Image: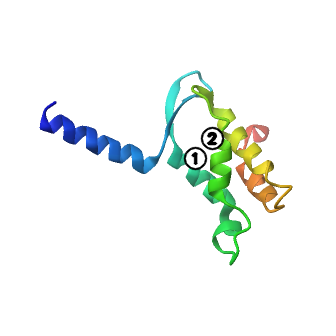
Amino acid sequence: MALEERRQLVLQSAITADKGRRFQITQLDGSVTTLMESDIRTRIQFACGEFEQKAAFPLVSSDVVLEESLKNFYEGIREDEVDTASILAARSKIEKEPAYSFVAARLLPVSYTHLT
């Protein structure tokens, strides 16, 4: 293996490691695309919002929701099931901490189809 090829592999590994795991998902139109763990993490962190960030003692953990959500992922998961996995992960924590109900609500996909 040439030195330049090794550099490319190391660079690609660093980029992948920075964004986390990759998942092949099936979009609603049937096409397949890649979803990065960092994208899911960002969405869950946004949903956790002030319950995690501003509290002296955080009520919720985006890492806990993310890991629970990823347990339900499989190769070729449908796009809509990605959201469902995150919602169910947050929902499973409500009994221990009711603040997770707000996280689950914020993870609900917004549908504007009723407006048209």
- Which numbered marker is on residue 70? 2
Which residue is outermost to the right?
95
Mark 2 touching mark 1, by CB under 8 A?
yes
Q: Is residue 48 left or right of residue 38?
A: right
Q: Residue at x 74, y 67 (%)?
A: 59
Q: Nearer the viewer, residue 90 or 83?
A: 90
Q: Vertically, is 109 above or below 79?
A: below
- Classify mark 1: residues with Cα within 10 Å, few (<14), some (14-19) or many (20+): some
Q: CA distance from mark 2 to mark 1?
A: 9 Å
Q: Is residue 15 left or right of residue 39?
A: left
Callout 1 amino acid? Ile
Image depth: mark 2 or mark 1 in front: 2
Specify the quadrant of the image occupied by residue 80: top right
Place of residue 94 in the rendered image (x, y in percent of width and height, measured from the top left) = 83, 55
Q: Residue at x 67, y 60 (%)?
A: 61
- In this view of the protein, can residue 108 be seen by the observer? no
Callout 2 amino acid? Leu
Q: Residue at x 63, y 49 (%)?
A: 66
Place of residue 21 in the rendered image (x, y in percent of width and height, measured from the top left) = 49, 41
Which residue is outermost to the top?
30
Q: Earlier in the sequence, mark 2 or mark 1?
A: 1
- Quadrant of the rendering where the C terminus is positioned: top right
Look at mark 1 in the image and give the residue it sits on.
Answer: 40
